[in-house]
Image (tube, rainbow, N blue to C red):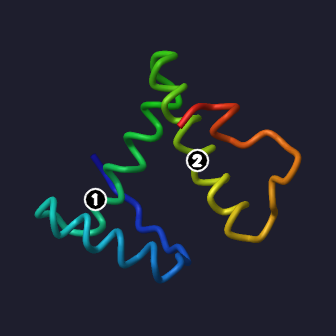
């Protein structure tokens, strides 16, 4: 399989996480990131349970980002109430 080099700007915290996870898996960061992206692609185009798991994961990240940004939920449903813990 041929490969193409890709350059991306990532948050330093995310880069640290990627390096740590790749090290724990015993593979280079490039390989780890390719596996994560491939798994995400497979979940997106796979069976409905994989699509649902992917949607839940992406929603959880968006929710954490929204909450950390100081957008309170006072008087509104929480993501846990909508999607479950």
Above or below residue 67? Residue 43 is above
**Extreme residue in the left direction:** 26
Q: Which mark is residue 60?
A: 2
- Where residue 72 sits, quadrant-wise, is bottom right
Left or right: 46, with 16 as reference point: right
Residue 69, image x, y percentages: 74, 71
Left or right: 80, with 12 as reference point: right
Badge 2 element:
helix
The residue under the point 56% across, 36% down is 56
In front: label 1 or label 2 = 2
Residue labelled with disc 1 = 32
Above or below residue 11? Residue 67 is above
- Earlier sequence position, callout 1 versus callout 2: 1
**Extreme residue in the right direction:** 75
For disc 2, the neighbor class at 10 Å (few under 14, some 14 to 19, many from 20) is: some
Q: Nearer the viewer, residue 2 or 76?
A: 76
Residue 1, image x, y percentages: 27, 46
Q: Which mark is residue 70?
A: none
Badge 1 element:
helix
Above or below residue 82? Residue 30 is below
Residue 63, image x, y percentages: 67, 52
The residue under the point 17% across, 70% down is 23
């Amino acid at each position: 399989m041929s490969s193409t080099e890709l350059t991306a700007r990532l948050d330093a915290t995310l880069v640290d996480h990627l390096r740590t996870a790749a090290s724990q898996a015993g593979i280079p960061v490039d390989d780890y990131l390719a596996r994560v992206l491939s798994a995400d692609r497979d979940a997106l185009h796979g069976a409905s349970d994989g699509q649902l798991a992917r949607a839940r994961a992406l929603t959880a990240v968006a929710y954490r980002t929204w909450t950390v940004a100081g957008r309170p939920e006072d008087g509104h449903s929480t993501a846990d109430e909508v999607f479950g813990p």
